[in-house]
Amino acid sequence: MSHPARSVAVLSDIHGVLPVLEAVLAEPDVRDAELVVFTGDLAAGPQPVAVLDRLTGLGGRAVLVRGNADRELVALARGTLPGEAACAVDLWAARQLTPAHLALLDGLPHPVVREVAGFGPVVFCHGTPRDDEEVVLVDTRPAQWAEVFAGLPDEVRTVVCGHTHMPFVRLVGGRLVVNPGSVGMPYGRPGGSWALLRDGQAAVRHTPVDVPAAIDAVVAGSAYPGARAWAETYLRAGIGDLEALATFGPRDGREMHK
């Protein structure tokens, strides 16, 4: 792209949930965005093939970034990650992918940098710019953020990440950090969370959905034996944000610095 993108919608952690993805893609600000960036964990869930086909069908305005679950699906499918190391839905999803889907996931970059009007170069990643599995949270200590950012050029003043399924926007040492939350496995409230970068402003958005209808659509569109139980848990946001923070918190290094 020869010019900075005027507007960028960011969706993350779709986890193979097509009906909520469709609801977010139908948002006017997503439809009108010059770029739609997907910051990882695209297919690990009950509708992996349908979601990947939908994303590739968006053409050149879609930018796909690798998440840890995307990498793990490839390893499961190719036998380089033992099945007992994965949850049941991921193991099932890996078996649904065609060679073309596996090649797509295997070739995803991490991180990705795009010029965005009003922001300059923006780093889009999954966990952090240096590691697709690293955990950073809204209350992660400044010293840990400094380590995470240590390899970034000074001109990068905005970082967009995913992985923890909890949306936030915050400043850290003069850098803006945006987490759009999750489309397919939200923690805290049902519906699809996403973010919009436009006119130098970053905002987290939320798309409400008819949850029972979305659950029925997942079940109808998936051959995964546990699809209904999985969807009931995750599409209803059965895991709360405070519960998730308590689980993820020790993984950002805070326990070692008490």
Image (cartoon, rainbow, N blue to C red):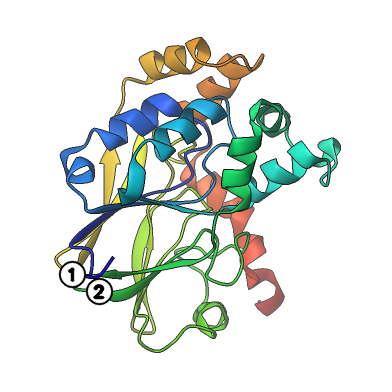
Q: Quadrant of residue 18?
A: top left
Against 164, is 3 above or below? below
Between 256 and 67, the one lying in front of the other is 67
Quick check: 230 left or right of 158?
A: right
Q: Position of residue 10 (x, y in %)?
A: 34, 52
Residue 6: horizontal and vertical position, in percent? Answer: 17, 62
Say the numbered circle drawn on residue 104.
Answer: none
Rendered image: mark on residue 200: 1
- Mark 1, secondary structure of its residue: loop
Local crowd size for mark 1, using a 10 Å CA cut-off: few (<14), some (14–19), many (≥20) = few
At x 40%, y 19%, the residue is: 214
Q: Quadrant of residue 88?
A: top right
Indicate which disc residue 119 carries: 2
Q: Residue at x 30, y 50 (%)?
A: 61
Residue 127 image point, x, y percent: 55, 61
Label 2, residues with CA under 10 Å away: few <14, some 14-19, many ≥20? many
Q: Amino acid at mark 2?
A: Phe
Q: Is residue 200 left or right of residue 114?
A: left
With respect to residue 187, does 251 lie above or below?
A: below
Query: In the rendered structure, which amino acid carries the disc numbered 1?
Result: Gly
Percent x, y of residue 84 = 85, 37
Spatial CA span between label 2 and label 1: 6 Å
Can residue 237 be seen here? The reply is no
Label 2 with label 1: CB-CB less than 8 Å: yes
Q: Quadrant of the N terminus?
A: bottom left
